[in-house]
Amino acid sequence: MKIDNSGKPLAGLGAKPTEVRSSTAEKADSTVAVSSSVNSKLSGVASNEATFDADKVAQIRAAIAEGRFAVKPEAIADGLLSSVKELLAR
């Protein structure tokens, strides 16, 4: 179904309104299921995390401000892969 700028369906094009409603409801159901799954995994991760090290944060902040902070893409990639593997294992 195509929609013009007014937001009204153009006559004679695309699916019937009942088909659109059904498809939209199915997508909404699957979106809710995915959102619930992601939220439960994120809350599990948040509850397992230790408190942050304020001194380390202050040191990193100072290094960034002074231009001494070096970004290591390999270390970032390794950390991301390890986090994803851990999340997928749960």
Image: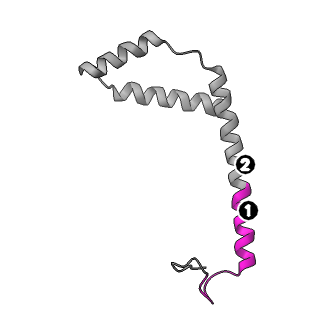
Q: Which mark is residue 35?
A: none
Q: Mark 1 sits on what residue?
A: 26
Q: Mark 2 sits on what residue?
A: 33
Q: Position of residue 73 (x, y in %)?
A: 35, 29
Tag 2 or tag 1, which sits nearer the N-term? 1
Q: Position of residue 46 (x, y in %)?
A: 63, 26
Callout 1 amino acid = Glu
Q: Where the C terminus falls, by quadrant?
A: top right
Q: Residue at x 59, y 85 (%)?
A: 10
The answer to whether 18 appears left or right of 65 in the picture is: right
Callout 2 amino acid = Ala
Q: Would residue 15 be counted in the magenta stretch?
A: yes
Q: Residue at x 71, y 68 (%)?
A: 23
Quarter of image, res 75: top left
Question: Is the magenta region chiefly helix, strand or loop?
Answer: helix
The answer to whether 52 appears left or right of 38 in the picture is: left
Closest to the observer, 43 or 84: 43
Asked if 4 appears above or below 30 in the picture, the reply is below
Asked if 14 appears above or below 33 in the picture, the reply is below
- The boundaries of the magenta stretch are 9-29
Give the residue at the far bottom of this rendering.
12
Q: Residue at x 74, y 63 (%)?
A: 25
The answer to whether 65 appears left or right of 23 in the picture is: left
Q: Residue at x 60, y 80 (%)?
A: 8
Closest to the observer, 46 or 65: 65
Asked if 7 appears above or below 60 in the picture, the reply is below
Asked if 76 appears above or below 53 in the picture, the reply is below
Q: Would residue 40 be counted in the magenta stretch?
A: no
